[in-house]
Amino acid sequence: MIRTSARSAVPAARFGALGLAAILVLGGCSGDGGDPNAEAAEAAENNSSSPSVSKSFDPTGSASPSATPTPTAAAYKPATAEGPAENVPLPVMPELAKEESAEGLKAFATHWYALMNYGFETGEVEPMKQISGPDCVVCGNVYRLLGNGYDEEDWIFGGELVVMSTKTNYVVTSKGVYQVLIQIRQDPYEFRGPGGLLYGENDGVEGTTVQMIEATYNNGQWFAHNAVTIQ
């Protein structure tokens, strides 16, 4: 890819329509047959391994244990303006998020955003795809943004999403799904490239916004069929 300057090397269409608005606003209202009470609800309430032991030879005939060092995992390194994040740990779904309950649904929603953050740090979206439907509005925008942000050797610096609160009426809607509201904010982020290139910046969300996930529970796990922005 040929680049001539920090800001003009990439066509405006590459990032212009894929900023935070694409993730947090494009979803609009869910509208199509959801539970109006659930959709109108306000999202205001909150929510080592031991070293192995081997036996060493003792000339007296007794065996004495000696510690074998445990391999050390590579240290996590967050992204900077000079380079992408390294050794980012994949979020592990908490046990609560596997429960078929209101609290389980809220924990699942929080984990869903943890996987989105993982994508912002790595460009990898497969973990999020595994628990999201193909028609998920927010998901589609995230996939496109990250695909562009991590093109070739490029990366995204910043953009962490923070879940402020979650709320659910935990009632099955006419569409056969449960709805959970998530109040979130997002840090500013930059689209970066090798050699100090800065393609663009996004202010994130200084306040908060509310999104809704529509999910079902089958075979011992939650699945997000759709996610939209409602406020």
Image (spheres, helix red, strand yellow):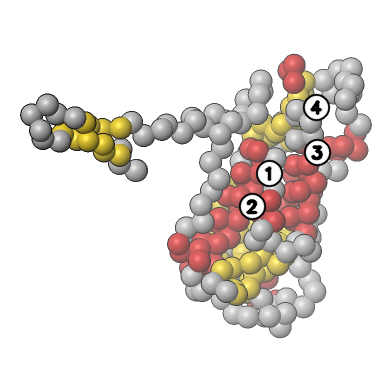
Disc 4 is placed on an element classified as: strand
Image x and y of residue 130, in percent: 66, 58
Using the image, tell me which numbered label, if any, was put on residue 127: 2
Instruction: Name the residue rendered at 75%, 42% in the picture.
Output: 146
Three-letter amino acid code of the residue under disc 3: Asn
Please identify, in this view, whether the residue under mark 4 or under mark 2 is nearer the observer.
2
Please identify, in this view, whether the residue under mark 3 or under mark 4 is nearer the observer.
3
Quadrant of the image containing the N terminus? top right
Labelled pair 3, 4 in contact (Cβ < 8 Å): no
Q: CA distance from mark 2 to mark 1?
A: 7 Å
Instruction: Name the residue rendered at 78%, 59% in the picture.
Output: 137
Q: Earlier in the sequence, mark 3 or mark 4?
A: 3
Disc 1 is placed on an element classified as: loop
Q: Earlier in the sequence, mark 1 or mark 4?
A: 1
Using the image, tell me which numbered label, if any, was put on residue 199: 4
The residue that label 1 is drawn on is: 124
Image x and y of residue 223, in percent: 63, 67
Please identify, in this view, whether the residue under mark 1 or under mark 4 is nearer the observer.
1
Q: Is residue 77 left or right of residue 191?
A: left
Instruction: Name the residue rendered at 91%, 31% in the picture.
Output: 11
Image x and y of residue 32, in percent: 80, 74
Q: CA distance from mark 1 to mark 3?
A: 12 Å
Using the image, tell me which numbered label, if any, was put on residue 148: 3
Q: Residues within 10 Å of mark 1 (few under 14, many from 20)?
A: some
Mark yes or no: residue 208 visible: no
Disc 3 is placed on an element classified as: helix
Instruction: Name the residue rendered at 82%, 20% in the picture.
Output: 6
Q: Earlier in the sequence, mark 3 or mark 2?
A: 2
Image x and y of residue 120, in percent: 66, 41
Three-letter amino acid code of the residue under disc 4: Tyr
Disc 2 is placed on an element classified as: helix
Q: CA distance from mark 4 to mark 2?
A: 27 Å
